[in-house]
C-alpha cells in the first residue's frame, strides 16, 4: 500500500512562518520610517504657518509677539518649565490677533523655542521660532547664523524673521 499524506511537513511550515515574520518586520519598519517622515513634514508645515501668523501679528501691532527670551531655558532642553511657560505666553498673545487657537506643543509634544530679539552680528534683529524636532533637544542656540544662511542646528525645524 502506498500512503500519500496530504499536508505540510513541520519544516515546510516553519520556513513559511519564518518568511512571513521577516516580511512583516520589514513592512513594520518601513511604516514607522514613513510615519516619522510624515511627522517632520507636518511640523514643517506648522512652523511655516507660524511664519505667516507672526508676520500678520507684526503688521497688526508693529512688533513681533511679546518678548519672552527663553533661549536660556531652551539650552537646557525643551522640557524646561521656563520654556514651556514662555511659549504658552507667546501663543496665548497671538490668539486674539492672528491665530484661531493656541498651539503649545510641536508634533513630538515639546514646546517651541522662541526668541523675538535674536541678534545676528552686524545685521538687524531676527525673531525665530523652532520646533526642537524628534530628538527633543534644542540644537540651534549658539550656532553662527548669518543673513545669507539662517539655518537651524541638528534636527530643529526653525523659521527666522526680520
Image (cartoon, rainbow, N blue to C red):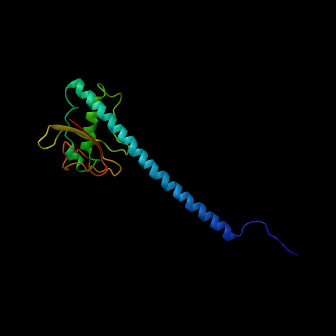
Which residue is most to the left? 122
| Residue at horizontal 72 percent and vertical 67 percent from the top | 8
Question: Where does the image place residue 114, in percent across and percent down from the top left?
Answer: 24, 40
Return the residue nearer the eye: 77 or 52: 52
Q: Position of residue 106 (x, y in %)?
A: 35, 42
Identify which residue is drawn at 84% across, 72% down: 3
Looking at the rendering, in which quadrant would you find the C terminus? Answer: top left
Task: State whether residue 71 is above or below residue 65.
Answer: below
The residue positioned 26% from the left and 28% from the top of the image is 57
Q: Residue at x 67, y 68 (%)?
A: 12
Q: Is residue 56 above or below residue 125?
A: above
Residue 129 located left or right of residue 3: left
Q: Left or right: where does residue 49 sit relative to residue 119? A: right
Direction from residue 32 to residue 154 in the image, left or right: left
Residue 52 spot, x, y in % from top left: 30, 31
Between residue 50 and residue 106, name the one nearer to us: 50
User: Residue 37 location, x and y as percent?
Assistant: 42, 48
What is the quadrant of the N terminus in the image? bottom right
Quarter residue 62 falls in: top left
Amino acid at each position: 500500500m502506498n500512503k500519500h499524506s496530504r499536508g505540510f511537513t513541520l519544516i515546510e511550515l516553519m520556513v513559511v512562518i519564518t518568511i512571513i515574520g521577516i516580511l512583516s518586520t520589514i513592512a513594520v519598519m518601513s511604516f514607522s520610517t514613513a510615519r516619522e517622515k510624515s511627522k517632520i513634514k507636518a511640523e514643517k508645515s506648522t512652523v511655516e504657518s507660524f511664519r505667516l501668523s507672526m508676520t500678520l501679528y507684526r503688521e497688526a501691532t508693529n512688533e513681533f509677539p511679546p518678548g519672552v527670551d527663553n533661549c536660556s531655558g531652551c539650552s537646557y532642553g525643551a522640557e524646561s518649565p521656563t520654556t514651556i511657560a514662555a511659549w504658552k505666553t507667546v501663543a496665548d498673545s497671538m490668539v486674539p490677533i492672528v491665530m484661531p487657537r493656541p498651539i503649545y506643543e510641536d508634533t513630538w509634544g515639546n514646546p517651541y523655542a522662541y526668541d523675538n530679539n535674536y541678534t545676528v552680528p552686524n545685521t538687524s534683529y531676527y525673531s525665530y521660532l523652532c520646533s526642537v524636532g524628534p530628538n527633543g533637544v534644542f540644537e540651534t542656540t549658539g550656532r553662527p547664523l548669518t543673513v545669507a544662511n539662517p539655518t537651524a542646528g541638528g534636527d530643529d525645524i526653525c523659521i527666522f524673521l526680520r
